Image (cartoon, rainbow, N blue to C red):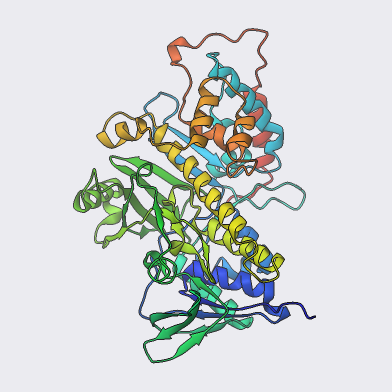
Amino acid sequence: MSAPAPPHVVVLGGGSAGWITACLLHQEWGESGGRVTVVESPQIGIIGVGEGSTPQLKAFFDHLGIAEDKWMGLCEATYKLGIRFAGWGERAGYESYFHPFPGPIDLHSEPGFIANCAAARRGFDAPAHPDDWFLASELAEAGRSPLPADTFPFGPSYGYHFNSHRLGEFLREWGTAHGIEHRPLTVSEIEMSESGDVAALLCEDGERIEGDLFVDCSGFRGMIAQAKMGVPFRSFGENLFNDSAVVMPTAHSGAFKPQTEAIAMKAGWRWSIPLTSRVGNGYVYSSRYLGDDEAEAELRASLGTAADGVEARFLKMKVGRVETSWTGNCLAAGLAQGFLEPLEATALHIVIVTALEFASAYEQGGFSAQNRDAFNASIAARYDGIRDYIVGHYRLNQRTDTQYWRENGANDQLSDGLKAMMTAWFRHGDMREANERAYGGRNYYANASWHCLFAGYGTFPPAEKMQPVPDTVRIADRSATQVMLQACAQNFPKI
């Protein structure tokens, strides 16, 4: 008896999410007879504001065997070593902090940071600001590349900033050159079978496109999963207040740091993302606290004359996730699957993980639905775990100047996982153990990241109550660590 054949996958929608999914599924099954077709409407544009990534995007390109010099220039891409959060607190000395992508060198400095955080949490005056303990922080501040000299064997983890329109175009060209079929058609209807599966996409020109599996990358519309198959959508609005954004690109000054800036505003935050050709700017806010005109005015004021004459573009965000990412013979991906506001740039991260986990689950189940429930549970837990970390930024904020920040800081609509992490921190528990217990060992965010979040906001006892460190408490030498990190940084060239 012959083994089941890989499926014909039909992807509805292009953009970064559609083409990433198509490329990964083609990479998995193309050589063994699987087919991938992307049906992409030429009339429907992409939202195109997700211009930052986690290191998962580098892993994606490595998986496909695409070198950086083949795509970065075409996509106006720059390196990203982490995120600089500014203005999220009022405590002196904690006006900003850097959340790095930890790398190999940090294995030597992170234990000192963790130890000092433990001491500071207990009220001892130990240096525990995250900026002092990670190589990526040093490199970003100095404007250095994450690519070390040939004589230095250890580089940091890193992601990218990129032009999302150009990225989608590049992946379309790469995908079609490697055997993916591209159909520039507008879908008008979804044809269902008697069994409740998707049978075909019906296009405006009368064409009918059949497939074995269908991937819904139709954006917030969710044409297949939500609109046609009735998959419920779970809103995260009760603990993630932001539902709107205003976007304004500005001219490039020529100098930049390899980091995303997340700068707190009156009713949300704004990003600053450096590309090779321009700077991407956007203000993510809650319409419950701020109108569109007010948001535009506040963003323009923060950008100064650089925004003169620049047209503002407004977006509405549907924050949450579908209850099940894989329903029948349909996989929801990208915005049709869910959206967590862009604070930690996790959108493409989830797209990549979804595609790879789906391919594994489907193939290991003999190209059947055998592993569907386990896959859905895994993806839902990932969404919820990432959501918790993002909610933590708002719940732990140290601002009191507007109703938005005060109500975020008082929000009690928290998951058990986030409550467990907060309890461990403020009751001097072991954060690594709490992370393992709260998220079943999946560690969607590493121990270092959780420490950066809490310590970066200065969530320690008030400065006036901090006590001298007794001899019985182990404190890491910040000065020695900084000398080590600065010496390592000399092996990385200036951008």
* 244 w.r.t. 60: above or below: above
Q: Quadrant of residue 440?
A: top right
* 381 w.r.t. 66: above or below: above
Instruction: Name the foreground residue: 23 vs 279.
Output: 23
Residue at position x 47%, y 26% in the image: 458
x and y percentages locating residue 71 in the rendered image: 58, 69
x and y percentages locating residue 470 in the rendered image: 62, 7
328 sits to left or right of 234: right
490 sits to left or right of 257: right
126 sits to left or right of 345: right
x and y percentages locating residue 36 in the rendered image: 59, 79
- Whether residue 159 is visible, yes or no, is no
406 sits to left or right of 378: left
Residue at position x 73%, y 79% in the image: 32
x and y percentages locating residue 392 in the rendered image: 45, 36
Count of numbered circles on the image: 0
- Which quarter shows the N terminus? bottom right
Q: Residue furthest right?
A: 1
- Whether residue 72 is visible, yes or no, is yes
Q: Quadrant of residue 120?
A: top right
Q: Residue furthest front?
A: 194
Residue at position x 36%, y 33% in the image: 411
Instruction: Name the foreground residue: 19 vs 255.
Output: 19
